[in-house]
Image: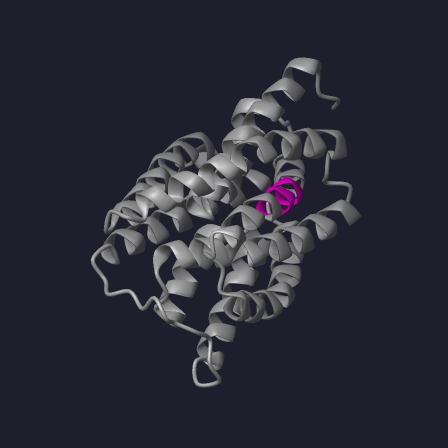
Amino acid sequence: MALDLAQYALGALSGVLVGLTLGLFGGGGSILAVPLMVYLVGVPNAHMAIGTSAFAVAANAGTGLFAHARKGNVKWRCAAMFSVAGVAGALAGSTIGKAIDGQKLLFLFALLMLGVGALMLMNRGRREDTDAECTLEKAPKVLGFGAATGAFSGFFGIGGGFLIVPGLVASTGMPMLMAIGSSLVAVAAFGLTTALNYAVSGFVDWPLALIFVAGGVAGGALGAAVACRLAEKKGALNGAFAALIFVVATYMLIKSAGAWAS
């Protein structure tokens, strides 16, 4: 089913919102991209929405990464370790995800979001290690978190940043702002892996993806700047991130709950 001009315009607007939240929360763009594709743009096939958004999020993550890297918010060794371990997981997860009913996939995705949101609230007052690095001693833990996060990312067709951020925090103890910047490397890697796997099955609308990416470029730099300001207030980023997750997850649960009754 071909999309009309109004839907492509909404795709550009959605891209702006995703780029903004990617720069602001690292994973916010990932959790918004799929529901925006389905409920705002009106992409009729859930798997098409997942595949298209995975590519768009991967590209927009590159824009956000550039902005965060300029501000020194990226731990490159940690990001590389996470990405390498997660790419294999993303490939396996996305292969399994394609075989599951799209609406049920969205429902399960929303449940996972609620769990991650609760964890983010629990960690608001934790102690941060600004000098945290991914040493050989931490490597097994970082690689393990990376592989698991990649599998979830591929399964749900998302960049996975909202999983990567808490994963990086838990495995390294780095500050939230550093985790957000570093997560964008893995978001791009996981999203591209998932998108290519979905593209093989014809589940990527390339014109929509490119329009989505163009909108995301406009929002990415602004999001990174706002994130730096919020980071000055202890717990503010964690609280805002969790609130965003709860709102979107609740909406998705309501919209997709019927899939289990059919």
Q: Residue furthest bottom?
A: 137
Residue 51 can be seen, yes or no = yes
Q: Residue 94's spot in the image, x, y percent?
A: 64, 55
Q: Is residue 29 above or below residue 190?
A: above
Q: Is residue 16 above or below residue 63?
A: above
Across the whole image, how many numbered discs are drawn on residues? 0
Dividing the picture into quadrants, the one containing residue 254 is top left
Going 40% across and 35% down the picture, which residue do you hit?
248
130 sits to left or right of 234: right
Going 43% across and 64% down the picture, which residue do you hit?
168
Dividing the picture into quadrants, the one containing residue 73 is bottom left
* In the image, residue 100 lies in the stretch drawn in magenta: no
Q: Which residues are magenta?
A: 54-61
Q: Is residue 229 above or below residue 194?
A: above
Is residue 240 or residue 106 the one in the foreground? Answer: 240
Is residue 27 or residue 248 the one in the foreground? Answer: 27
Dividing the picture into quadrants, the one containing residue 110 is top left
6 sits to left or right of 18: right
Going 61% across and 56% down the picture, which residue do you hit?
190
Q: Is residue 219 above or below residue 185?
A: above
54 sits to left or right of 106: right
* Image quadrant in which the N terminus is located: top right
Is residue 127 or residue 92 the one in the foreground? Answer: 127
Residue 38 can be seen, yes or no = no
- The kind of secondary structure the magenta stretch mainly shows is helix
Q: Residue 183's spot in the image, x, y percent?
A: 50, 57
Q: Residue 12's spot in the image, x, y percent?
A: 61, 25
